[in-house]
Image (tube, rainbow, N blue to C red):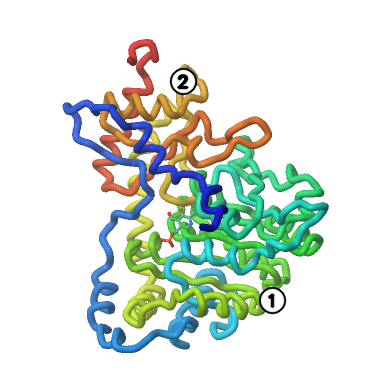
Amino acid sequence: MNPLLDTLHPYPFERLRALFDGVTPNADYTPISLGIGEPKHATPPFILKALADNGAALAAYPATAGSPALRQAFAGWLQRRYGIAIDGASQTLPVTGSREALFAFAQAIVDPTARQGGEPPVVLCPNPFYQIYEGAALLAGAQPHYVPSDPARNFAVDWSSVPEDVWARTQLVFVCSPGNPTGAVMPLPEWEQLFALSDRYGFVIASDECYSEIYFRDEPPLGGLEAAARLGRTGFQRLVAFTSLSKRSNVPGLRSGFVAGDAEILRKFLLYRTYHGCAMSGMVQQASIAAWGDERHVEDNRALYREKFAAVTPVLAPHLDVRLPDASFYLWAGIPEIWGRDDESFARELYAQYNVTVLPGSYLARTAGGTNPGAGRVRMALVAQTAECVEAASRIARFAAQPRTAQS
Ligand SMILES: Cc1ncc(COP(=O)(O)O)c(C=O)c1O
């Protein structure tokens, strides 16, 4: 079999299962999980209805490029959301969730035969990061290079830390804005810096924006295409943005999203996808057209998250290094100093004593330059209902306030 499969790292949730193996959680408490970032708010009924009304579409093979109406729906949404002009036909493509698209994109972009001084091509991943980037890079025959995010600068990714010889080998850069797990939005000057580097070294930027609609400030997060357009890069050279309905519309099971950007790259990506066989079902296309065309449910969804974060964050803030993120549905919290950087023990003891699951931050990052930027942090996904999240937060606060010596 492909030996590169052996280079893949275990997924964070597998590691979490192993960490909790043999631990009996305190049965005085009901279990609450903030571990997995799976949206839990209700799917809007009009999306379910659009699915149910379009069963006839199952009688035909769907086109990989999607219907013209679907791509028009993408272009219309981009215009309304970011004020940018996009040609749906040549500058967008449907994808069956951004996860498969991020993975497939690396396979289409990376040229594993391109070597410099005998060294393989490089794919840059922010650190911490969404693990699909790394697996996609490894299976494409590239070497991931992890670029740390800086807690002192709102978790901005430190692009200037990348050495010149690494830039020279870089073929693909993953940007995650709003970030998972940090919630940070990449501001325009950083986009400008990255575009200049892309012009200089010729790499492609994959901008993962699946949390773009869950935000807490007045201004909606800047998108990659929007940043490009503001800087006069209207052809979106070497830039492709990845967007999804999973979080925006609470349909993680629908598997629906789209990519938009550089037409030349998307033309070849379509070719790749035709062979890969990941066309979106006609039923899903119709439901997606309905979802992208409606903002009301997105506003309601955002309001629910805002209410939840406003209730939870103050409960945790006295005990953990935590604050409202720019966007996303995660809190990326520093654990109390008495735990040092031992996020694994913190998560395991919290589970044992209070039956609350959080994800150790070190599972979402890699050690690079001697440090794991996720160590000493935990990720909390506030996807459950507000009351449940507040209950979890008050248990975490109680746990974090205890001296460590009182814990087993
Ligand atoms: C940063 C990031 N990108 C992409 C995805 C994939 O989402 P989907 O495939 O549902 O669009 C996730 C899911 O959790 C994510 O956290």
Front residue of 1/12: it is 1
**Mark 2 lies on residue:** 339
* Horizontal side, residue 235 vs residue 185: left or right: right
x%, y% of residue 106?
Answer: 59, 63
Observer able to see residue 387: yes
Residue 118 versus residue 319 in the image, above or below: below
Q: Residues within 10 Å of mark 1 (few under 14, many from 20)?
A: some
> Which quadrant, please, contains the C terminus?
top left
Q: Local crowd at mark 2 within 10 Å, few (<14), some, or many (≥20)? A: some
- Ligand 1's quadrant: bottom left
Q: Earlier in the sequence, mark 2 or mark 1?
A: 1
Cα distance between the residues tagged 2 and 1: 49 Å
Q: Is 67 positioned to the left or the right of 222 in the image?
A: left
Q: Position of residue 85 (x, y in %)?
A: 60, 79
Q: Residue at x 22, y 26 (%)?
A: 26
Residue 371: name its quadrant.
Answer: top right
Q: Residue extending furthest left?
A: 28
Seen at 49% across and 74% down, the residue is 276
Task: From the top left corner, tell me how far across and down residue 240 is, in percent.
Answer: 61, 68
Callouts 2 and 1 close, C-beta under 8 Å: no
- Secondary structure under badge 2? helix
Which residue type carries mark 1? Gly
Task: State the mark number for residue 200.
Answer: none
Left or right? Give the position of 340 relative to 143: left
Three-letter code for the amino acid on which mark 2 is drawn: Trp
- Which image quadrant for residue 16? top left
- Among the 4 quarters of the image, the one containing residue 201: bottom right
How far across and down, in percent of the image, does residue 259 sit?
53, 71
Q: Is residue 399 above or below residue 242?
A: above
Q: Is residue 68 above or below residue 285?
A: below
Residue on which disc 1 sits: 235
